[in-house]
Image (tube, grey):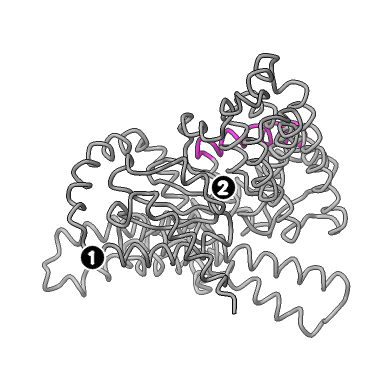
Amino acid sequence: MSTDTPENKNRATAAAILPLVGGADNVTSVVHCMTRLRLGLRDRALVQDDALKALPAVMGVVEDDTYQIVLGPGTVARVTPEFEALVAEGQSAHSPSADQLAAEGAALRAAQKAKNATPFKLLLRRIANIFVPLIPALIGCGIIAGLNGLLVNLGWLPAVTPALASVASGFMALIAVFVGFNTAKEFGGTPILGGAVAAIIVFPGVAKIDAFGQTLSPGQGGVLGALGAAVLAVYIEKWCRRWVPESLDVLVTPTLTVLLSGLVTIFGLMFVAGEISTAIGTGADWLLTNTGAFAGLVLGGLFLPLVMLGLHQALIPIHTTLIEQQGYTVLLPILAMAGAGQVGCAVAVFLRLKNNHSLRNTIKSALPAGFLGVGEPLIYGVSLPLGRPFVTACAGGAAGGAFVGLFSMLGDKVGSTAIGPSGWALFPLLQGNQGLGTTIAVYAGGLLVGYVVGFAATYYFGFTKSMLADMNAPAAETAADPARAETKEPVSV
């Protein structure tokens, strides 16, 4: 009987990674997002970058405040628990070198943290930490919502569609609670208190309350209101912990936290956040209706640099707000065109550098993930290290974005019912103000334009003669080795 089961494969991947990051005693934290294993390390110098990148399961590495190993969606969720188990087993032996490693890595960690810990970057990371854990539920519910809409339009299974609608909508109806829970956790408060305060926003009874001369409505303020309410609750809770006697803390602190932050939420935050949320939805509609082609050109062209710098995380609350309001976000399909430009660019590089087997092997392994919207391997392993192809990839994204934006100006808006996937993986989540066929056709057309322009721009303008001579010679293959991507010091996506 074969022992090559998925469990064994995932454990083997984890076992291969562990010694290359310095062993169990060099690991201080283990988490994962949609595509990456994110490790806190005592001593960065112990990591063997080239050996890691050579592992078949590893698509690339990114160094930020954590060391990030790109494994791809699905794989990372299965490898992480195996890796955590191996780390726990290794640390239980309490290697005597742990203290030494900690001392040697202290200066390095401090320098790296100071380098990446600007207030703005820290805020974006906190936003990502709040919303990224919600993405699996958004994706699952979004696909179910799309399936339900298709069945309703076709008139099929009328007895089942109400149940599907409930399954798809239940999470979105209470998303504010989850945002409040994660926000309190991220800002150092008690998560359940953050969730309790955020729950006020979606409680039907707020419809009986008048604030600022108007009657509140359940859900008013949405995720932005929940985020603000939970942050306020954290600060009130921390104030109470400092001043309330320990003997009364268990009674007084949670009561004051929920009461004070709850009243401010009802008589202030819900109204303010509601106005901001409405402005976001109105602004997005106006932008695409009146300047769709230009807006798509700018958004699609700039998204790869935003991803490279980690600034795209600021868009997560905007996407979520649009999904709450309209049922879909009109921005994500436009931004997804950046990935199409990247794919077209990679194909052109593959054809232009026929003798560079190292780079061509990287492209062959990363391209399938690129078609499904996982762009990190192509960004950090191909276009960014080469320089000019990164710019031509952005040109492809700009062209695809302009195409989708143009149709928004013509009245055919294309949206996504969830955030996270892009590329071909976004098709099951598409929704718009026209029929599903039209929506799919516009999005597919945008991808095609992104592929073609990204390919053509890279093929004809992505290389100078000297670049081609240096990188296309078999003996000089290492000149375009994707391992050099690390010297660019990319920031987390």
Q: Are marks 2 and 1 in contact (CB under 8 Å)?
A: no
Q: Label 2: which residue?
A: 59
Membership of 481 in magenta stretch: no
Numbered circle sitting on residue 417: none
Residue at horizontal 41 percent and vertical 46 percent from the top: 67
Q: Residue furthest top?
A: 466
Secondary structure under badge 2?
loop
Read off the magenta span.
Answer: 292-311
Secondary structure under badge 1?
loop
Which amino acid lies under the numbered mark 2 shown in the image of this protein?
Met
Quarter of the image holding residue 320? bottom right
Residue at horizontal 41 percent and vertical 58 percent from the top: 31
Numbered circle sitting on residue 93: 1
Quarter of the image holding residue 298? top right
Residue 321 lies left or right of residue 392; in this view the side is: left
Pick whichever, 472 or 33, lies toward us: 472
- Name the dominant secondary structure of the magenta segment: helix
x and y percentages locating residue 172 in the rendered image: 59, 66
Real-space Cα separation, disc 2 to disc 1, in angstroms:
31 Å
x and y percentages locating residue 1 in the rendered image: 59, 79
